[in-house]
Amino acid sequence: MTPPVRRRLLVVVPAFGLLTLAVLLTAPTMGSTAISLGRVFDTSIPWADNVDAQIFFVARLPRVLAGALVGATLAAAGVVLQALLRNPLATPFTLGVSAGAALGAMLAISWQMDLGVLGVSSVPVASFGGAIVAIAIVYWLATSQKRGLSTNILLLAGVTLNSFFSAVILFVQYLSDYTDAFRTIRWLMGDLDVSSYDPIVAALPFVVLAFLAFAVLPRALNLLTLGDDVAASRGVDTARAQRLAFFSASLATAAAVSLGGPIGFIGIVVPHLVRLLVGSDHRVVLPAAALFGAAFLVMCDVVSRTVMAPLELPVGIITAMIGGPFFLWLLVKRT
Amino acid sequence: MITDTHVRLRVRCLIHAQRREDHEDGTKNAILSGTRRSERCRTERSVLRACCVIFVIVVSGAVWPLETQATPQRIISLVPAVTEMLFAIGAGPRVIAVSSYDREPPEVEALPRVGALLDPDVERILSLRPDLVVLYGSQDDLRTQMGRAGIAVFDYRHGSLAHVTDTIRALGVRTGYADGAEAVAAAIEVRIAAVMKRAAGQARPRTLLVFGRERGALRNVYVSGGRGFLHDALEAAGGVNVFADVDREAVQATTEVILARAPEVIVELRSSDRLSEADVVREVGAWARLASVPAVRQRRIHILTGAGLTVPGPRVAETVERLADALHGGMRP
C-alpha cells in the first residue's frame, strides 16, 4: 500500500468511524417514547417491570444494529458491484437479488408458508431463499459461454431477471388477497423493526464472510474498473476476482434484504457520495462507504420512527427523501 | 342513471339556490343603491338565471330520461360484505353474480364471478344484464360505465359499526326487502346492545386489537386505530382501544409503541389463518418477548380465528360477542 493511501486511510476511516460510533450511541436513546437511561441500566428493577429497559433492549437496540448491518452491507455491495460491472448506475439490486428476495417474501406471505427456523420467521427465510435462487440463475447465465464470468451478460441477465421476477410478483399479487398484496408492498418499502436479535445473528455469518472477501478485493477492483485486460496485465486473476466480487456482494445483499427488506437508495448514492468526499480509490472508498452507509441508515431509521410517532414512516421512503436532495446538493457543489 | 328522485332533488336545490340569491339580491339593492337602473339590472339578471335554471332542467331531462326506481330483479355485488347483507335480508335469489373474493354465504359458490375492486369485468357485468350493481365507493370508472349503460348502482364504503346496520336498512329499501332488512338490522343491534349492557358493569381493559402480523414473529404488526367498525366493535365489547387516539382504521404498531402503550389485553383476529392448537401456542408465545406488557404478564392474549371476524356484514354482532368473551371471559348468558 502506497504511503499516501495509508495516510488517507488513517484520516478517513477514523473520521467515518467516529461519525458511525456517535450515531450508534445516540440512536438508541431517541425514539417516540421518552425513556430514562438511569432506569434502563438499573439492574435492581426486575426485567419484567422495567419498561424503559425493554424499550431500549427489545425495541430500539435490535433495530439500530439491524440498520447498521444493512446500511453497511448495501453501501459496500454497491461499491463492489459498481466496480465489477464498470457501471456507475449499478446497485446491490441490479443483479436480480432484491427481486428474487421479494418474490420469496411474496410467496411466503401469500401462501402462508411456515419456514421459520432458528428464531427467524418465514418471510426473511423465504426472501433469502429467493435471493439465492436469483444469484444462482444469474451466475449460471453469465458463465454459460464457458469463457469465465461475462460482466455484460451478468448485467443484462440481472436486469432481465429483475423484470421477470417483478412480473411474477405482480402476477402472484394480482391473484392474492388485498391484505397480502399490501403486506408485500409494505415489505418492499423496508422495515428495520426486527424486535429480536435472532434475525441479526442469522444474517451476520453471511455478512462477515462477504466483508472478509471485500477486505481482499479493493486492489483488484481498482484495476477492474480500468478494464479486464489492464487488470490481467497487472497480475490480477480477473475471473477469480470477478467471481469473488459477484458472490460476496450478492450474498451480503441477500442477507441484508432478508433482514430489512430492499431499502433503496443506499446502495447507489452512498458509494457516490463517499467518492465525492474521499476520491475513487477502492481501498479508501470501501471501508468509508460501509461506515457511512451504517450511519446513514441508522439516522434515517431514527427519523422514520419519530417523525410521525406513534405512526412509523417506512425507512425506504426516508432514505430517498433525505439522501436525494443531499446528494444533489453535494453533486452541484463539487462539480 | 338519473332517476326521478335525483331530478326532483336537483330542481329543489336549484330553486332553493335561486330563491336565496333573489333574496340576497333584493336586500343588497335596498341597502346599496335603490336606483331604478340597478333594480332593472338585478331583475334582468334574475330572469336570466331563472331561464338558465329552466334550460338546465330541460336539458337534463332530455339527456337523461326520467326513470322510475324499479325494484331490482338482477343484482350483482362486488362487495363481499354487502353480498352477505343481501342474502341475510332475503334478497339472495336476486343476486346473479358476485366478486372474486366472495365466500359467504355458501350459496355464492355457484354464482358467476365478475372481478373485484381493482379488476371489475365490465364486459361480463354488462352481459349478465343486471339492473343493480353494488360497487365500492372508489370504483369511479365502473360507476361511470354503469351510468352510461343505464344500470343503477348502490354505492358502498366501509365505515363505522352503526354504518353496518344503516347499510342493511338502505339496502332493504333499495331492493324491496325493507322488512327483512329491518329484522336483520334490529337483531344485530339487539345483540350488540345486550353485549354493551353486560359489559357496562365490568372493568374496561386497555386492549390492543391486532388484525395482522408475520407468523411466529412480532414484525409488521397491524392494529386497529381509532376509526372503523373494528374499533367500534372493541369499544362496544367493553374494551378501550390503546390506539384510539390515532384517527386511522389501521396502524402499523412498532415494538416500542406497543411496549409504551402497555395493553392489558391483546386480541388477535386471524380471519384468514387456519391455526392448529400448536400454532396458537406458538403465536401466543411470540408475544413473550415483550415481558413488561401487562397482557403478556397476565397471559391475557387471545387469538380469534374465523373468516367473518373482519367482515363488516351481518355477522358483525358475532365479532362483538367474541371480542367481549375474550375481554371478559365467557360473559354470554
Image (cartoon, helix red, strand yellow):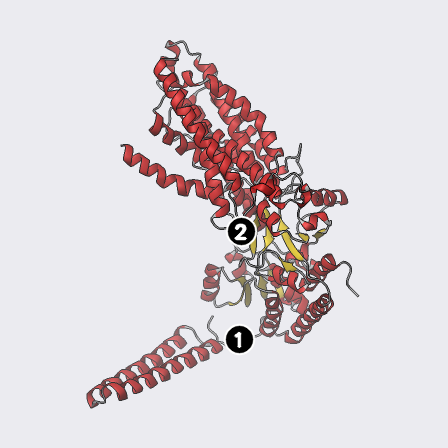
As measured in the structure, the alpha-carbon distance from the residue carrying label 2 to the one carrying label 1 is: 48 Å
Mark 1: which amino acid? Answer: Gln
* Displayed quadrant of residue B228: bottom right
Compared with residue A218, is residue A47 higher up or lower down, i.e. above or below? below
Numbered label tally: 2
Whether residues under marks 2 and 1 lie with C-beta atoms below 8 angstroms apart, the answer is: no
The residue located at (41%, 41%) in the rendering is A320
Q: Mark 2 points at which residue?
A: A310
Q: Mark 1 points at which residue?
A: B69
Extreme residue in the right direction: B333
> What kind of element bears circle 1?
loop
Position in image of residue B172 (x %, y %): 62, 72
Compared with residue A331, is residue A318 higher up or lower down, i.e. above or below? below
* Displayed quadrant of residue B239: bottom right
Chain at numbered mark 1 = B
Nearest to the observer: residue B145 or residue A228: A228
Position in image of residue B316 (x %, y %): 67, 63
